[in-house]
Image (spheres, rainbow, N blue to C red):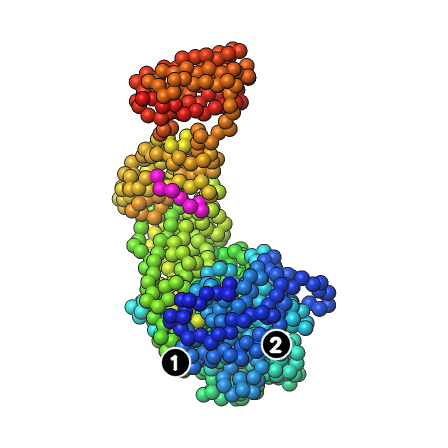
Amino acid sequence: MKKNYPKSLLSILLTLFFVSIVSAQENENVWSIYKGKIENEEIIFYKPKPKYSILIGLNIEALKQKLINAPQRQSSTKNQGIVLQFPNHKGEPESYLVQEASVMEHNLQSQFPEIRSFVGKGIDNPAAVMRFSISPQKGFSGMILSQRKTVFIEPYTQDLKTYITFINSIEDGPRSNFVCETEYDPADFRISDKDLVRLKNANDGTLRTYRLALACTGEYAQFHGGTVADALAAMNTTMSRVNGVYERDLGLTMVIIANNTDIIFLNSATDPYTNNNGVTMLGENQTTCDNVIGPANYDIGHVFSTGGGGIAQLRSPCTANKARGVTGLPAPVGDAFDVDYVAHEIGHQFGGNHTQNNNCQRSSVSVEPGSASTIMGYAGICAPNIQNNSDDYFHGENIKEMWANISAGPSSTCFASSSTNNVAPIANAGPDYTIPISTAFVLRGSATDVDTASGLTYCWEQTDATPATMPPQPTNSGGPLFRSLDPSTSPDRYMPTLNTVLSGSLSSTWEVLPSVGRTMNFSLTVRDNEAGGAATDSDEMIVTVQIFSTPFTVNNISSWPAASTQDVSWVVGQSSSLPINCQAVNILLTTNGGLSFTTLASSVPNTGTATITVPNIANTSNARVLVEAADNIFYAVSNTFSITDPLSVNEFELENLSIYPNPNNGEFNVEFNPKSGEDIALEVYDVRGRKIYSNLFNNASRFEEVIRLNNAQSGVYLLSISDGPQKAIKKIVIE
């Protein structure tokens, strides 16, 4: 539990072959970029305008008319729906296949027909899933989950006509004084290592639906407008987002029970809760839900308040303590409340522990450095902080914990199950490796999926939970050295990021290479990102850092002529010997800061030197050589250096320049009128960039010299003539 310290129209040709789609592609007059002026008193957005955001106009009535045709998810296949467009954080339209996905049981939904929830599967971006809600009370609220930073769409003005679409920035301010505590069941659940391997991922093609008794204090209801419909609309917004995360990471969803209005309290003086005391509310909510709803009529209970922080009992759904969950903030609204707090506390109830590795409530899965950055961490709450808000996904270790609980533990006995017909991906983290100290490396994974290959995302995470100095230090012999990063469509992760290494550093604050011998455990979590019941898989590997080894480095390079032959050298150290045993390396070149690489040599012996041919490219001062193990995962980069193309220098027509005869037999005349008064430099290069002739001549009013290239082979050569700042490059042919 947490604590607040101060602190186009899209082409659907592909889907036409596979899916039935109810067409709703006419998006005219729904969204528009807002360009007007807004007075401060009209603004209802709950925080300073985010750095990455844009204001948009919404014709909500037009959107509602289109949504009438959205099919119910539970009675549709995953490829049925209506195609609608929604703006990203830049205001650009992106297309989604939309179904209605109510977060309320049928009778409650019938009672409040205008409070609705929907899910959209990305068409432009197959890895994207959108969850959004709509109501007269709260307007439109949306969340787009993908391999990129999460996009939120929120009401911006009181009339619910202007909205803000944004992504959270790590520069957002720290979070307020939120207290999170966790209660453990005395009959603590344990599972064998053998079963844990089997039960670590959402991979059985089942969507688990839990009936949620969601209560609120009078203070919460008053904050949202003071009526049952107001409170329920707010709950609908929150749970639409929370379900989006849980459906993607755990194949789990929650529906608010049919008689939930019985536990929406409007009067703080008469409700059964102590609004500002989370610990007390644990028992109060259990009693209230059992007495009012009945123990047999719900699977998990939770209460929203405007104070008291957050507290929840581990692995409590389906048990006698299933309503022991509380989330309270002075302003219980928005992306932070929904993801950082509610998803976090419910995560405890489903069996997730804290992941931060600092002084604030370490656990058996304290696998994230500092205050962590995933949902079950303390992002922005307990220094040292990686960032001020949680990223909206669960760490792989939390997925394992919660999946074990809902598939074989105390919370595995009460849900309703439905088949998703979704085959889980198969993750492959690759073999274990040993590498030198203080040496960058790349984790390379892969995955297969028979039904969702285009939408897979990959997340590499360290899983070492030993308490350690934070921020992480190179000398830490245990604990996490690398933070978790958002799932990506690439199965590879550079450790640290390639940008860090190319900047000249081997570490950043939250990604640190070890300078001592140790082991690092890593897990690759693969998500298929199917809407309405996704699946995951994970695989583990170990990186051992060899004690008393020498860092693998590339020696400095001064400059290279284009198309020349050059030697590349590097420090082998102990890398060619057991246990590292790297016998071959690849040599690559980048001239654009690592955006792309050209292979100079492949699988050359790891002896410390190799001869390569420089590509015939234009001048650059941003060249870097990367030497990587061909049979391991470590690598190093050189300094930045220049590559000069003799044909691309500033060329001047020297006055009355004459070169004759040309072609010739290796002997020719050069004549021109010098201008600079400086010595005249003549150089001759072969087509591989090798200099075969060089000479300096005294300046005179007329330059006339015979050049003899002894033993030159037949072919094309380049003659460089320098007269002070002026230079001419001419082609000569020897027969």
Q: Residue at x 35, y 26 (%)?
A: 716
Q: Residues within 10 Å of mark 1 (few under 14, many from 20)?
A: few
- Where is residue 326? Give x, y as percent: 54, 75
Instruction: Identify which residue, 594 or 62, lies in the foreground.
Output: 62
Is 546 placed above or below 460 here?
Answer: above
Relative placement, left or right, of 600 versus 262 is: left
Q: Quadrant of the rendered structure where residue 218 is?
A: bottom right
Q: Secondary structure at mark 1?
A: strand
Q: Secondary structure at mark 2?
A: helix
- Where is residue 454? Give x, y as percent: 39, 63
Label 2 with label 1: CB-CB less than 8 Å: no
- Where is residue 531? Give x, y as percent: 44, 71
Give, as a single range, the part of the protein colored magenta.
Answer: 594-600
Disc number for residue 58: none
Amino acid type, mark 2: Glu
Label 2 vs 1, first from the N-terminus = 2
Q: Which quarter of the image is occupied by the C terminus?
A: top left
Evaluate whether residue 640 shows in this view: no
Residue carrying label 1: 417
Evaluate whether residue 8 shows in this view: yes
Q: Residue at x 35, y 29 (%)?
A: 688
Relative placement, left or right, of 361 versus 29 is: left
Residue carrying label 2: 61
On whether residue 136 falls in the magenta region, the answer is: no
